[in-house]
């Protein structure tokens, strides 16, 4: 018997397991795939000489996360690499907005679009510096973040209070229009908002775009040196050094509940693994409440609310092994780790509207990653390990292009969509396709087959929209890691604060389990003392 069973060896599950092991608990992590990591893995499947990240690649939230910083993973061999520039958004007319960790470089890039826009960016950065400590504390702690929230409220008041709060709730299109005269700053904000499923007209997309932009300004968009999986390996090694175990190829099919309490799990192989203290689930909320826990153990209201759970956009990804550097028409893009490809904010709005109406975009907004530019160990000198992903509808109703895509994502549709992504890259880097040595396509069904949490290609564990954040995540009133089943905790991106590689959902779940254990021990001691006192009186 183990103290805790963790379902899933993604980053949140491994963070949770490490924190429990730090507290002296025995921990066993069960992972359905044949290797740990969830969406933090790399391989050499595109070309043996190229390291390719299977899913996530750049980690600004990891760089900012006090959770991961507290684990000191550098002691387990984890290193970080940065591109010369964080992000570039080129336009076909030769202009290019550049985000750099050097504030003056970023400001100069935006000043080239319109006089005064460099100073406007610095004002946004000043707001960030005023709010950053309290905001990060609030972001990476359980909801409601009472102490962190109080500190953030004080900083918010000092930074302009209601005015700044209003700005953060703006759609990113409106924020860009209010802050910048030219298109450069607007592009950086709107492109970063679409790292999630937030259209330029979505409420709160301005705040998310600002957050991602300021994370890049301060921390960059770093990558684990050698490949995304080195972050996972460091977490696994750290856990092993503390006596924890990770078992792969073990799919959990049921959370065992007795008398309203989670007491273990059953696996697809028929094994029952007993948990003395807690079960932590790094799985999506629909999987936990709709499959792993029997319906009779859950409140009817939760089950009803779960029917309204909203996933984020589906994702289509292409990996490449390139025989040379990308031939960008904008030279500045060659130094950026991440390149955004869309012809202005209007194009981003058009892209998001096509997805909203169920149509596969004809000119997909592509997030392009230059991994060798960021980490030279990823491929031989003079080559580039690269990828791009774009969002597509979860349920396809039509194709805005000419390929008659239906969303079946059979071999023909995968090849056609990959060609469409490459055509988008060619618009900004003529000659790109001639450099392709090999490519790999990861359509939504493939992504889900490699990580069950990526349901239909959703990468954030549920929409980032305001109606499913904070106290509404994953459902109204369920904003904490505790579940209706005692001893069972939700530890995935479906829980607050949501997607991204930062470890907060796993940490929140682990701390809730530890807190429950301490509270229970104190209550038991008080009960014993009361019983002893009464016996003495007799």
Image (cartoon, grey):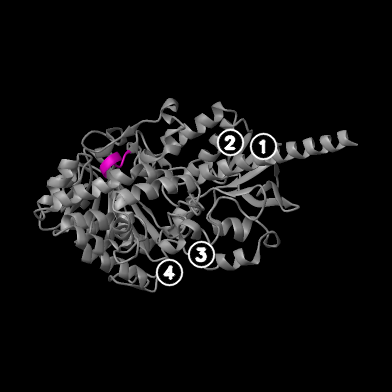
Quadrant of the image occupied by residue 280: top right
Q: Which residue is mark 2?
A: 20
Say whether marks 4 and 2 touch (CB < 8 Å). Answer: no
How far separated are the C-alphas under marks 2 and 1? 9 Å
Instruction: For mark 2, give the secondary structure.
Output: helix
How far separated are the C-alphas under marks 3 and 1? 31 Å
Q: What residue do we see at 49% from left, 48% from top? A: 146
Q: Which of pointers 4 and 2 lies earlier in the amino acid sequence?
A: 2
In reply to whether residue 177 is colored magenta, the answer given is no
Q: Which of pointers 3 and 1 lies earlier in the amino acid sequence?
A: 1
Nearest-to-viewer mark from 4 and 2: 2
Query: Furthest residue to the right?
Result: 538
Which contiguous range is marked in magenta? 217-222
Q: Which of pointers 2 and 1 lies earlier in the amino acid sequence?
A: 1
Q: Which of pointers 2 and 3 lies earlier in the amino acid sequence?
A: 2
Q: Which of pointers 3 and 4 lies earlier in the amino acid sequence?
A: 3
Nearest-to-viewer mark from 3 and 4: 3
Q: Which residue is mark 3?
A: 309
Q: What residue do we see at 39% from left, 66% from top? A: 393
Left or right: 345 with respect to 40?
left
Position of the N terminus by quadrant: top right
Q: How packed is label 3: few (under 14 Cα within 10 Å), some, or many (20 or more)?
A: some
Front in this rendered view, residue 344 or 34: 344
Front in this rendered view, residue 17 or 228: 17
Say whether marks 1 and 4 touch (CB < 8 Å). Answer: no
**Number of marks drawn:** 4
When the figure is inspected, residue 27 is found, relative to residue 176, above or below; the finding is: above
Instruction: For mark 1, give the secondary structure.
Output: strand
Q: Which residue is mark 4?
A: 395
Q: Which residue is mark 1?
A: 3
Position of the C terminus by quadrant: top right
């Amino acid at each position: 018997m183990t103290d805790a069973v963790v379902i899933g060896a993604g980053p949140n599950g491994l963070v949770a397991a490490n924190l429990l092991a730090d507290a002296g608990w025995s921990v066993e992590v069960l992972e359905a795939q044949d290797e740990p990591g969830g969406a933090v893995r790399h391989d050499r499947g595109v070309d043996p000489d190229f390291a390719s990240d299977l899913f996530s690649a750049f980690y600004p939230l990891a760089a900012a996360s006090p959770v991961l910083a507290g684990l000191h993973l550098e002691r387990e061999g984890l290193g970080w690499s940065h591109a010369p520039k964080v992000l570039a958004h080129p336009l076909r007319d030769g202009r290019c907005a550049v985000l750099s960790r050097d504030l003056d470089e970023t400001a100069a890039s935006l000043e080239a679009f319109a006089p005064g826009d460099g100073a406007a960016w610095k004002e946004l950065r000043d707001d960030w510096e005023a709010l950053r400590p309290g905001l990060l504390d609030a972001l990476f702690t359980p909801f409601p973040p009472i102490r962190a929230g109080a500190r953030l409220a004080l900083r918010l008041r000092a930074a302009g209070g209601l005015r700044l709060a209003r700005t953060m709730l703006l759609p990113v299109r409106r924020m860009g229009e209010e802050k910048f005269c030219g298109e450069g700053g607007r592009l950086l904000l709107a492109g970063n908002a679409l790292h999630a499923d937030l259209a330029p007209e979505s409420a709160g997309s301005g705040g998310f775009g600002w957050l991602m932009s300021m994370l890049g300004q301060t921390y960059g968009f770093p990558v684990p040196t050698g490949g995304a999986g080195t972050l996972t390996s460091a977490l696994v090694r750290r856990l092993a050094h503390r006596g924890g175990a990770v078992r792969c190829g073990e799919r959990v099919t049921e959370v065992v509940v007795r008398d309203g309490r989670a007491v273990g799990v059953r696996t697809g192989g028929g094994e029952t693994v007993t948990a003395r203290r807690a079960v932590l689930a790094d799985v999506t909320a629909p999987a936990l409440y709709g499959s792993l826990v029997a319906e009779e153990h859950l409140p009817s209201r939760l089950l009803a609310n779960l029917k309204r759970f909203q996933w984020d956009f589906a994702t289509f990804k292409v990996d490449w092994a390139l025989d040379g550097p990308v031939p960008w028409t904008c030279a500045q893009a060659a130094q950026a780790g991440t390149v955004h490809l869309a012809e202005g904010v209007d194009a981003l709005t058009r892209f998001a509207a096509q997805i909203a109406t169920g149509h596969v975009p004809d000119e997909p907004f592509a997030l392009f990653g230059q991994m060798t530019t960021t980490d030279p160990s990823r491929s031989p000198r003079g080559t580039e390990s690269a990828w791009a992903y774009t969002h597509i509808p979860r349920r396809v109703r039509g194709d805005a292009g000419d390929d008659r895509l239906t969303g079946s994502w059979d071999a023909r549709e995968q090849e056609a969509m990959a060609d469409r992504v490459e055509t988008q890259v060619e618009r900004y880097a003529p000659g790109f396709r001639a450099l392709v040595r090999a490519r790999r396509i990861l359509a939504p069904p493939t992504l889900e087959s490699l990580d069950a949490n990526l349901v239909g290609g959703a990468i954030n564990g549920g929409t980032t929209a305001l109606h499913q954040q904070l106290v509404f995540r994953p459902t109204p009133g369920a904003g904490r890691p505790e579940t209706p089943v005692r001893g069972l905790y939700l530890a995935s991106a479906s829980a607050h604060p949501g997607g991204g590689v930062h470890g907060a959902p796993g940490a929140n779940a682990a701390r809730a389990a530890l807190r429950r254990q301490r509270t229970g021990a104190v209550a038991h001691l008080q009960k014993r003392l009361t019983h002893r006192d009464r016996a003495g009186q007799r």
